[in-house]
Image: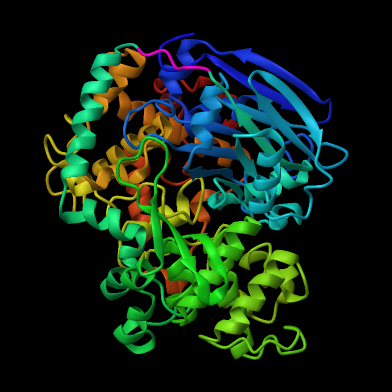
Amino acid sequence: MTNGYFGKILWIDLSEGAFKEESLPEEYYRSYLGGYGLAAKLIYEHMPAKTDPLGSDSIFGFFPGLLTGTIAPLTGRFMVAGKSPLTGTWGDSNCGGYFGPEIKKCGFDAILIKGKANTPKYITIIDGDKQIIDATDLWGLDVVQTEEKLTEKHGKIQVASIGQAGENLSLISGIVNDKARIAGRSGLGAVMGSKNLKAIVLKGNNKISLADKDLLSKHTKEYNQQIQESKGGITQIFKTLGTTAGNTMMVQMGDTPVKNWGGTAKEDYPTERQNKISGMEIAKYKQKAYGCFSCPVHCGAIMKVSEVGLEETHRPEYETCAVFGPMLLNDDLMSIFTINDLCNRAGIDTISAGTAVAFAIECFENGIINKDETDGLELNWGNSSAIVELVKKMIDREGIGDILADGVKIASEKIGNGSHEYAIHSGGQELGMHSSKFYKSMGATFAFDPTPGRHTTPTLDFGSYGPIGKPNGLFEGFALPEGYTNSGENRSEAEKLVVGIWQSLNSLGLCEFATSFQKYPLLELITGVVGWDITIDELVKTGLRIQTLRQAFTLREGIDIINNKLPSRAVGIDYLADYKSYCEKMGWNPESAYPLEETLKDLNLGFVITDLY
C-alpha cells in the first residue's frame, strides 16, 4: 500500500456475479487524484462511446477523494460517476456523510459496477468478505427503511441505496447514504436501479498509511481549533443555520430563481413570505448538529417536526428550500419539511423535482394541461397541498407524475403544445437554484460544462473565489490576475485557474464550503497524507486535465456542447462569447469546444485524440 491510498480498486460484475480487484499505478493518482478525476480516467477507458446508460454494459461507481478517510478537515466527500441517463453526458454527483471513508476502510480507492442482476440484489463488503445477496425483501422500501433493515441484519455498517425513484428508473433519481445524504444530480440512481441493485453495504477496518502523521495532525489541529474558536462570520453562520442561511439572503440579493425563473422577489415573493421559510424559522426544529466525516463545522442538522409527523428528519438544504419555496411561490414551511423527507427517502433530486413541479404549474395555469391530466390536482402557484401530492405521484410514477419523473425536457416533449417554453433546463438537466442573471459567469457554466445545469461546477462569480484568489489567500500561492472581475483576457484566465483548482479540490475530496471559511493548509495536508512535494501550479494543471477529460467524454458521446442553449428567461448576458474566450484560454477550439490536439498532448491525454479526431 502507498501512503494516502491503497493503489487498488474493486470491479463488480452483476451479470457474472463476480468480484475483481485491480491494482493501479501511482501515475493514475498523481495525474487524476481521486473522486471524479479517477472516475473520469477509469470510466472513459473502460466504457465504450454511445453505451446506453441504462443498459447492462454501462459502468458507474463510487469514488472517494484522495484525502477522504483521513483526518484532513472537510475531506469526507465522495463521488458517484457514470454516464448520465438524464443528459447523455458525463455524469457525476458529490456526496458527504460517512460512506466515502468506508470505501477506504474496505481497502479500495474506488468501487465500479457493471452488468445487470436478473433479480434485485444488494452487495456486501464486510471485513473483506464480498457477496451479492438477494434483495427481493428490500425492493419497494425507502432508503431509511432499507438502511434500518440492513443494519438489523449486518450490524454497524455504511449503506448507499436507492429508493422507489431509482427502482422506478426516474431519470432524476439519486443514491442515498446516511439516510438523507443524496448524490442527487445526473440521474445516477436510475443507473443503479437499471442494474437491479438496491444497495451497497460496507464495513471495513483497513487503515490508511500516512506519509507524515505529525505534519497532518499539526495542521489539522490548528485548522480545527480556529474553526471551533470562530465566534462570528460565515463559519458561525454555517454552524448555526447551514445552507439555509441563504433562504432569505439569496432571494433578497436576486440570486434565487422565483416563479419558475419568470418572477421577481419584489412582486411575487416579498419579505413577509421569505421570512416564513427562513433559516431561523427552520432552526427552531433543530435537535442536534450533523456533520460529515472529518468536518469541524457540522452544517447539517437532525430535526423534529411533530406538526407533520416527522420525529427525526434531516434539515432541508438551501437548494431544496429555494426550489420548493420561491420557485413555486410556496411559503408553507411544513410542506417543505414534508417534501424534503419524501424526496430523501425516495432518493429523488429535489432541484429537478421542484423544477418539474414548477413546469407543471405553469403548464396548468396556461391551459396546456387540465385537471383531467393532473388527477384532479389544482396546480396553482403556492398550493402546497397539491405540490406535496404531485411529488408523491412523481416518486410513484403515477399519472402525470410518470411524465414528470424524467425531468422537464422529456416531460415537455411528451406534453407538447408549446410546453417547452416552461421547461427550464440545460441539456436535459434542471438548473441549480442560483441565477445566471445575478452571477454573470453562471450562464456559460450552466450551458457548457460537461455536466450541464450544475451550480456546483466552478464559475468565476459564484462562491468564495475572491478570497481564494487574493495573494496568500485561502490557498497559499494561488492568486487570480488583477482586474479579473472586468471583461477581458484576465477574466478568462481567472476562469481557467478557478476551473483548474476546483476540479482538484473535488478530486481530493474537499467539501466545496472549504473555500468559505478560513485559510486552508492544502499543500501541507497533501504532503502529510500522500508525501508528495506538490505545488499549486501542479494542482491547477491536474484540475485542467480532469476537466478536459470530462469534456472529452461528453464530446465523445456526440453531444454538441457549443450549441447548447439556455432558456431565455434564465440568462441575461451573452454567455456564448464568454465561453469562447474561456475555451481559448483552456486550449480548446472556441468554435466547437473540442480540446486541441496539442492541449491533449500537453495534459498527457493523448489517448483521447483518436476518439475526437
- 175 sits left or right of 502 in the view: right
Residue 469: percent from left, percent from top: 18, 41
Q: Looking at the image, which residue sits at the far right?
A: 118
Q: Residue at x 66, y 48 (%)?
A: 189
Q: Residue at x 53, y 31 (%)?
A: 63
Q: Is residue 519 visible?
A: no
* Residue at the (68%, 52%) spot, across then down: 145
Percent position of residue 570, x then y: 43, 70
- What colour-coding does the image apply? rainbow
333 displayed left or right of 371: left
Q: Nearer the viewer, residue 82 or 123?
A: 123
Quadrant placement of the C terminus: top right
Q: Main secondary structure of the magenta part?
A: loop
In which quarter of the view is residue 554 placed?
Answer: top right
From where the camera sits, is residue 141 visible? Answer: yes
| Nearest the eye: 243 or 537 | 243
User: Which quadrant of the figure has residue 586?
Assistant: top left
Is-magenta flag for residue 435?
no
| Magenta span | 206-210
Of residues 379 and 478, which is closer to you in this image? 379
Side (left or right) of 38 relative to 193? left
